[in-house]
Amino acid sequence: MRVGGRANSELRKITITRNYIKYAEGSVLIEVGDTKVICTASIEEKAPPFLKDTGRGWITSEYSMLPRSSQTRIVRESSRGRIGGRTHEIQRLIGRSIRAVVDLSRLGERTIWVDCDVIQADGGTRTASVTGGFVAVVDALSALKRQGKIKELLVKDYIAAVSAGIVNGETLLDLDYEEDSRAEVDMNFVMTRGEKFVELQGTAESNPFSVEQLEVLTSLSRNGINALIEKQKEALGDICLHPELQI
């Protein structure tokens, strides 16, 4: 039996709270079970040097875990003097996931910084960061639109992320930390509302997994992504996205 009695195909309880931070153009507290991440989207009125004079914008991300977000204290990476490989990987994942659904060619030479700070970790922090980070970016784009700096929200599709895995021979959706630590197969899926993949991350921790098992995990995750996007739509109820994205 899973924690909370949820089914193998069931997500943990999801709560998305907008406008969580006073000063950011977009901000969200996303809670996925006991995992809690603050996602902020901040607008900088300049693009990276490699986009100078192109008229294009950029979206990038920073990710961190607070020292006592886990069962033992995590040393701040600023204290170590370097960012770890895991952090680099997650930052790149968040940035490219959200870039995939925003029309950067019409953003102007601006940068949207997506900062994801884990205040409590119980598995799935990177997937929660993508899911919550998207909502924060939509709010930031909405602020630009209100200011007359862009004419449309520039959002081409919704995007969300979820984990899935095989634990004790069973395929499970949305692994918590205890399940993830025992997983024989651990996967992360990033997908759009149109069920297109942006990223697949999959690892066999013990035995290799079959194509049939991959198909089951993919099917579970597609359903999970669709449920997460419904939560995003509920949270963004007062934001008018493109008509095709309202349904």
Image: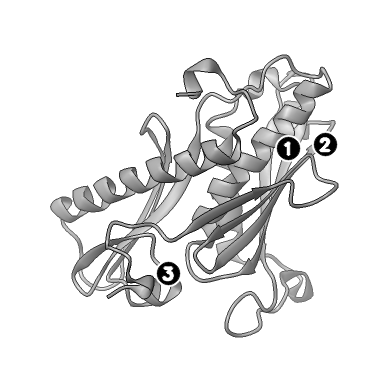
- Quarter of the picture containing the N terminus is bottom left
Q: Tell me, yes or no, whether the two marked residues, 3 and 2, touch with CB atoms within 8 Å.
A: no
Residue in view at x 37 percent, y 74 percent: 3
Instruction: Pick whichever, 239 or 147, lies toward us.
Output: 239
Instruction: Pick whichever, 130 or 84, lies toward us.
Output: 130
Residue in view at x 50 percent, y 33 percent: 158
Q: Tell me, yes or no, whether the two marked residues, 2 and 1, touch with CB atoms within 8 Å.
A: yes
Q: Is residue 99 left or right of residue 1?
A: right
Q: What residue type is labelled 3?
A: Asp
User: In the displayed structure, would residue 195 be above or below residue 185?
Assistant: above
Q: In which quarter of the image is residue 104?
A: top right
Mark 1 crowd level (few <14, some 14–19, many ≥20, 10 Å Cα):
many
* Residue receiving disc 1: 112
Q: Which amino acid does label 1 sit on?
A: Ile
**Earlier sequence position, callout 3 versus callout 2:** 2
* Residue receiving disc 2: 44
Mark pair 1, 3: CA separation:
30 Å
Whole-percent x and y of residue 80?
Answer: 74, 75
Q: Which amino acid does label 2 sit on?
A: Glu
Whole-percent x and y of residue 131?
Answer: 53, 47
Mark pair 2, 1: CA separation:
6 Å
- Check disc 3 and report its element: helix, strand or loop: loop
Residue in view at x 85 percent, y 31 percent: 45
Whole-percent x and y of residue 226?
Answer: 39, 40
Name the mark on residue 176: 3
Mark pair 3, 2: CA separation:
35 Å
Mark 3 crowd level (few <14, some 14–19, many ≥20, 10 Å Cα):
many
- Check disc 1 and report its element: helix, strand or loop: strand
**Earlier sequence position, callout 1 versus callout 3:** 1
Q: Is residue 24 left or right of residue 14?
A: right
- Check disc 2 and report its element: helix, strand or loop: strand
